[in-house]
Amino acid sequence: MKNLMKATVPVLSVLFITACGNGSTSGEKGKNDSADHSGHDHAAMQETTASTTAVTLKDDKLNAVYQHYVHLTTALTNSDMAEAKIASNAIEAGAKEVTGADAVASSAAEITAASDIEAQRNAYSSLSNEFINLVKKSGVNSGELYVDYCPMAMNDKGASWLSASKQIKNPYFGEKMMTCGEVKETIK
């Protein structure tokens, strides 16, 4: 059953992301509208989701939350508030099932309730710090995760996030400064 869940969660995530990106009927494209994404962004989202299949965490419940964390990170990288709310809502629900993840659930709820992308990114910083600690405690069954760090995020206070790729895609600035940051640590 665990293997079935590990195999289906990433597939369902890809299907969910694909379905969510095709529903706009509006002729106008706002910066928070999912219709604003070009095929390149969609391909990047699929690539990011596909890379998560190579990474599995030792804690199955935390691994399920990780899949939504990747979705959230991708949404913030693309400056997509609506997708960020969907992902954070799923993180909140999943984190309630993980021992010691109350702060993750609380930060996810802040992202869901946020009225602008900057507020989402601020809450994402707290969520990422807590999530990184949980992942370090849990450990990784397969693959590698990278703790990325951007010194300019949060008004030059700096902020971290997890990635399954060494390539920097900054969720704190999106297109403004996509490659700002560096890999600080590898979790194996």
Image (spheres, rainbow, N blue to C red):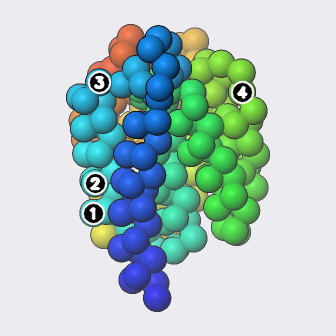
Residue that carries the numbered disc 3 in the rendered image? 38
Up-down relation of residue 175 to residue 69 (above or below): above
Say the numbered circle drawn on residue 159: none
Give the residue drawn at x 72%, y 27%: 114
Residue that carries the numbered disc 4 in the rendered image? 114
In the structure shown, which secondary structural element does the residue marked by tag 3 occupy?
loop
Amino acid type at circle 1 is Ala
Along the horizontal axis of the image, is 121 left or right of 170? right
Residue 18 picture location, percent across and down: 37, 45
In the structure shown, which secondary structural element does the residue marked by tag 1 occupy?
loop
Whichever of labels 1 and 4 marks the residue nearer the N terminus, that label is 1
Q: Nearer the viewer, mark 1 or mark 3?
A: 3
| Distance Cα–Cα, label 1 vs label 4 | 32 Å
Along the horizontal axis of the image, is 3 left or right of 118? left
Q: Residues within 10 Å of mark 2 (few under 14, many from 20)?
A: some
| Distance Cα–Cα, label 2 vs label 3 | 18 Å
Give the residue drawn at x 42%, y 46%: 19
Say the numbered circle drawn on residue 54: 1
Amino acid type at circle 3 is Ser
Q: How many marks?
A: 4
Amino acid type at circle 4 is Ala
| Distance Cα–Cα, label 2 vs label 4 | 28 Å
In the structure shown, which secondary structural element does the residue marked by tag 2 occupy?
helix
Residue 112 picture location, percent across and down: 69, 37
Please identify the quadrant where the C terminus is shown: bottom left
Q: Residues within 10 Å of mark 1 (few under 14, many from 20)?
A: few
Residue that carries the numbered disc 2 in the rendered image? 50
Q: Nearer the viewer, mark 1 or mark 4?
A: 4
Whichever of labels 2 and 3 marks the residue nearer the N terminus, that label is 3
Q: Nearer the viewer, mark 2 or mark 3?
A: 3
Q: Quick check: can you spot residue 28?
A: yes
Q: Residues within 10 Å of mark 3 (few under 14, many from 20)?
A: few
